[in-house]
Image: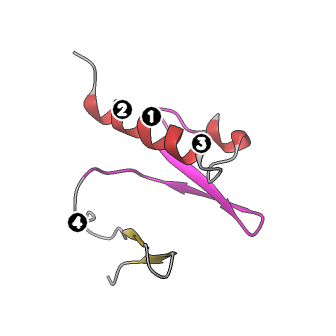
Amino acid sequence: MPNRGLAYEAEIREDLRKRGIMPLHLFGKCTQFGNDAAFAFSGQDYFLEIKNKTAPDYGARKIVYEKIPGIWRWNDP
């Protein structure tokens, strides 16, 4: 039986790549044994741990997309 978590991470990575959020140089750095996903912002690379749940683990933060006004923001800790 395939690992559903790994399949979910691969789906998110592919979506980020298609949208131009995850550059190809970072795509190869994300594997099942390392970072789940990544993005580049202002010349800096950032790596993400992907979880399919509504609340982050203790000590983690959640990033939220607000359709209006079209911005990403961190959730309140």
Say if mark 2 contacts mark 1, CB within 8 Å.
yes
Numbered disc 4: secondary structure? loop
Q: Marks 2/1: CA distance?
A: 6 Å
Q: Marks 3/4: CA distance?
A: 26 Å
Q: Amino acid at mark 1?
A: Ala
Measuring from the top left, give residue 36's x and y in whole percent. 47, 44
Q: Amino acid at mark 2?
A: Leu
Q: Which residue is mark 2?
A: 6
Q: Which residue is mark 4?
A: 55
Query: Does 77 appear in magenta?
Result: no
Place residue 32 in its image quadrant.
top left
Q: Amino acid at mark 4?
A: Ala
Magenta span: 29-52
Query: Does 36 appear in magenta?
Result: yes
Q: Establish if 68 lies above or below 45.
A: below
Q: Residues within 10 Å of mark 1 (few under 14, many from 20)?
A: some
Residue nearest the observer in this picture, 44 or 63: 63
Residue 62 shows which numbered tag?
none
Q: Which residue is mark 1?
A: 10
Q: Indicate the colouring scheme.
A: secondary structure
Q: Establish if 74 lies above or below 21.
A: below
Instruction: Identify the residue shown where x is 23% and y is 55%.
Output: 53
Numbered disc 3: secondary structure? helix
Measuring from the top left, give residue 48's x and y in whole percent. 49, 55
